[in-house]
Amino acid sequence: MNDRGRQIGARARERCAHARTALAAVLIAAAIVRVFWVTGLQRSEIGRILPLDMRFYREVAQGIAAGGGAGTGALTFNPLYPVLLAGVFRVFGDGLLAPRVIQSLLGIATIALIHAAGRLLAQRLSGSNGNGGNADPRLAGALAAVIALLYPQLLLYEGALLATTVVVSLFAASLWMAIAVSRAIDSDPAAGGRRLPWAALALGMLIGAGALGRPNLFLLLAPLVTIWLFLRAGGARGGGRRALRLALPCAAGITLMIAPPALYNAARTGRFVPVTAHGGINFYIGNGPGANGLYRPPEGMREDMRGLIEDARAAAGAASGRDLDAAEVSAYWSRRAGVRILIDPAGWLRLLGRKFLLYWNGTEYGDILDCAAFAEQVPVLRLLPFPFAVISPLAFAGIVLLVLRGRDRSLVAIFLSASLASVMLFYFNSRYRMPSLPLLTVSAGVLLAWTFGAARRRDWKRLVAAAAAVVLWYGLVAGREMIAVNRSAVYTFLGNHYMSEGEREKGLEAFARALELEPQGGEATINYARGLRVTGDSEGALAQYERAWRIDPGFPHLAVEYGSLLEETGRRDEARRFYLAAWESGRPADRVLACKHLSRAAYAEGRIDEAIEWIERGLEAVPGDRSLVDLLNRLEGR
């Protein structure tokens, strides 16, 4: 080897050493951040409280760890996370520390996978030679990893008993493996290498495992990736036999992972339900009458997972006139959503467009998990300054670059399309967008690396075009305020938790904070009124109830609560006016409450016939209501 060859080799080794050093620095920083995050979360009050969905997963996992089953009928929850959590509980107990540590390790692994995927995609840009052509692969991988490191939501979900962290890791691993297989196919055009079928099998198993945690995403990826693999290996060019050597192992890996829940569901329902049977109600929420692209349960249904499943089953059974199993309930709600789509296809297309924009919008919307609230008690979150509003335009422009100039454009399009469809076919929630974070951060990293290369080459025309695209996307989509986020919800939740635990002073402080964040929020005001009432401050509670009524004068349950407190303080005529307002509403449960209060008030004043009449009127509105029947029997048998 001549001197020039040795110099080139030395520079290549030096660049590789620098790349390894950069990755090590990012991963060490990620580990340090997570140590502070987990220890701070364990010490904080907010970290010890589990919202409804997290409590649901914990209870299911505890039942599985104790040897219990998953209930009767088809599965009504995604099984991957509860099963993994049950395994953790069996080994370490059912505390919160072990899951958080394990999920933090998964988060670090996700950042490493993002780095690897970013390097591979940058290498496969058209015209890139891996040494600083269109986009330096080492820089692209490092920047993608740094963006993931500095995105606070990734860290936030690692502390939650939710499937999000596991699903994000599986998506990152699937993306990296798919890119690696694509690159290997190029280096082995015959697609007959011994390792490739095993890599395809591993890819299928990753996608299948993901389907157990987020079926609405990975069940879309499964056929798309299998078909892509067949075509990529030459199936469209007459090399069907060689292509099947990769496509079949991929399909086998997917089948291997989803077979257990599918067989479990088939044994209990006699139907093919691949993973879970609660997708129908979610499809209805996202596409039924009144859908606005966000999570909003039908009238009268509870918001938490367990409550929604039970209420959806009860409503479907009542409408069908018989008890339905979980698969039938899911089919019922899917049909109802389908009818709405057929009646107003133009309106549905507008709704899909809104959900597309929400996916790319910078607003973090969804759960009780609010970064600002957690940052107040765990300050390390404040050190992570990269919001989605910045990731979105960089990622969008990066995807355009990869589709236009990348050799894996079809693969990028498949992963993006499945991610978009998983949100657009249902409803937007930051948690449901999170699995696509690896693709978005990788695309952003590739764009930034390409930008630095364009600046070095003084390619000002393309550089200005890319900058204009990023700025326009931010201004028109990512940076717009499309939805109002209820920042008070987490404090309302905390207040209710403290009140239930008897910590009334803390509860009132949390309710006051909620009201401070949302002065015109009806829910925050009502909960503050309830807290004041429980602590004996009737005058303060009345003032808050009056304020809540001015904010939302059509809320019948508020009318009942306000009326009952007015009655307690001797203002019976005013109380009757609010009871009558609740009675005139269209909500059966509140009408029943109003009837009871009106009957009791009449009875207290000696008007027995009127008391009976109100119970009878309630039974006309809600025939067979057990509590009203019991009251009527007592009144008539007095």
Image (cartoon, helix red, strand yellow):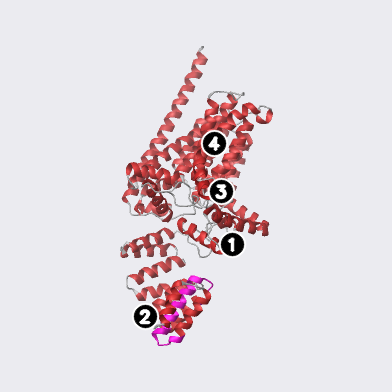
Image coordinates for residue 475, horizontal then vertical, percent: 57, 51
* Label placed on residue 271: 3
- Looking at the picture, how far across and down is residue 427, in whole percent? 55, 53
Is disc 1 in contact with disc 2, using a CB cutoff of under 8 Å?
Answer: no
* Distance of label 1 from label 2 (alpha carbons): 40 Å
Q: For the residue carrying disc 4, how many other residues have a C-alpha within 10 Å: few (<14), some (14-19), or many (20+)? A: many
Q: Which residues are magenta?
A: 583-609
Contact flag, marks 4 and 3 (Cβ < 8 Å): no
Check disc 4 and report the residue beneath it.
446
Q: Is residue 232 visible?
A: yes
Is 606 covered by the magenta stretch?
Answer: yes
> Mark 2 — residue?
569
Choose the circle earlier in sequence order: 2 or 3.
3
- Mark 2 crowdedness (10 Å alpha carbons): few <14, some 14-19, many ≥20: few
Dominant secondary-structure state across the stretch colored magenta: helix
At label 2, the amino acid type is Thr
Which quadrant, please, contains the C terminus?
bottom left
Rendered position, 186 above or below 574: above
